[in-house]
Image: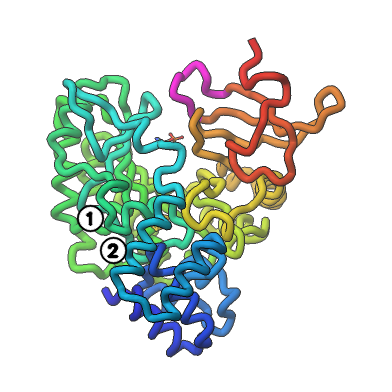
Amino acid sequence: MKVFSHERLARLAGERGMPEEYLHDLRVVSSVLPFKVNQYVVDELIDWSAVPDDPIFRLTFPHRDMLPPDIYEHLSALHLSAADPGVIRKAARDAHAQLNPNPGAQLEANVPTHRGRRLLGLQHKYAETVLVFPSQGQTCHSYCGYCFRWAQFVGNAEIRQAATGVADVVAYLADSPTVTDVLFTGGDPMIMSAAVLDRWVSPLLDPALEHIRTVRFGTKALSYWPARFTTDHDADDVLRLFERIVASGRHVAVMAHFSHPRELATEQARRAIARIRATGAVIRAQAPLIAHVNDRAQDWATMWQQLVELGVVPYYMFVERDTGARSYFSVPLTRAWQVYTDAIRSVSGLARTARGPVMSAAPGKVLVDGVVRIGGAEVFSLRLLQARDAADVGRQFFAHHDPAAEWFDDLRPAFGSWWPA
Ligand SMILES: *Cc1c(COP(=O)(O)O)cnc(C)c1O
Ligand code: SF4
């Protein structure tokens, strides 16, 4: 697979007709945030006649507004003065610290402790589901500009986390009878070879882990590299692995990241979806709502309708979280709710399995359920779809309606405290 990053990405953009001014921005931004684009995305997904406003170009290529202005100016000056690469790397590392690498301290807070040891590379926030970050799956076929996992990609060991072996996972799960779902995530677990993936998955099929009923794979490979399930040399082995999990009586859930209907349009993607479905796995689709890429209701309505036709279940519309290139991609909560509502109203009930807009915030998965008037005050009606404590799931609560709010931390309780006694 041919991939482009750093100087190769600049050369590619130049060959595709991007002006020198843009190439400078590209070099500056990609010296701080990670960018990687592969041949499939370049050839099959980006409409070069519509660049720079093309949604997939916006999704995968740098833009100067992805950096706060002061960081941009600083790095830009270093590049213009042809500063030593070591100096630029140091400035980039300083910038990383300002870009909120572990949003909400989620990684830290949710790492389980087992027999006195913290199991890095595992996250256990909700009783029924454990997340596994396999060390070999900490990259993706191509990168999204808004990725909140970028800390995993920039090679800074202090802000990186990954599980190094499946033994810890098995031992932890054996002692965790409430867990029914294991979710392999990354990066993208589908970057791993079938043989490596097998080493992570097969031990979960052990009779001692009968309580594990669902194996989920969070992936954007159906968008960025559908060949993973069609023509890659070990594509069939991946599908056989799915079949083996299904044959064990468990559910295989492919949590596919689809940002735009364009990603569903290629022959490769459609064939990959069909082949995965033929294994008995169910594909569910989720993505964040992001400015410049999918912030129109029509984008979602079209995507959900096509997903249903392809046999994929719409699952979550997320709110982009507060990290990295946030300001470039963020959409105010009020607008996100409007986009969701408009999209939902224009599709049939079968596509209304998509829930959103949802924030994965400190208290749990918070749904923006609407903007309503209560006692003369305009408020956000919020609901916990997921919570650390099962007793809080489904709980409704209210926040002042701040039209500029973009994330949970921007919200204030409408009635004194979040949880009125
Ligand atoms: C979303 C999420 C899950 C899975 O939640 P579901 O609502 O069951 O899909 C598990 N763990 C974490 C940390 C999550 O963010
Ligand atoms: S596919 Fe997911 S993990 Fe990979 S770059 Fe995009 S948002 Fe990040």
Toward the viewer: 313 or 327?
327
Query: Residue 127 location, x and y as percent?
Result: 37, 24
Q: Is residue 411 above or below residue 262?
A: above
Disc 2 residue type (three-letter): Arg
Does the magenta portion include 387? Answer: yes
136 with respect to 278 (left or right): left
Residue 93 falls in which quadrant of the image? bottom left
Q: Do the residues labelled 1 and 2 touch (CB within 8 Å)?
A: yes
Q: Mark 1 points at which residue?
A: 238
- What number is the disc on residue 228? 2
Disc 1 residue type (three-letter): Val
Q: In 3D space, how far apart are the residues under numbered discs 1 and 2 (Cα atoms)?
A: 8 Å
Query: Residue 10 location, x and y as percent?
Result: 40, 81
Toward the viewer: 108 or 112?
108
Range of residues picked out in magenta:
386-394
Q: SS at mark 1?
A: helix
337 with respect to 158 (left or right): right
Q: Rate crowding at label 2 as few (under 14), some (14 to 19) or many (20 or more) other CA atoms within 10 Å.
A: many
Q: Is residue 191 above or below residue 117?
A: below
Q: Can residue 164 be seen in this view?
A: yes
Query: Residue 315 location, x and y as percent?
Result: 51, 44
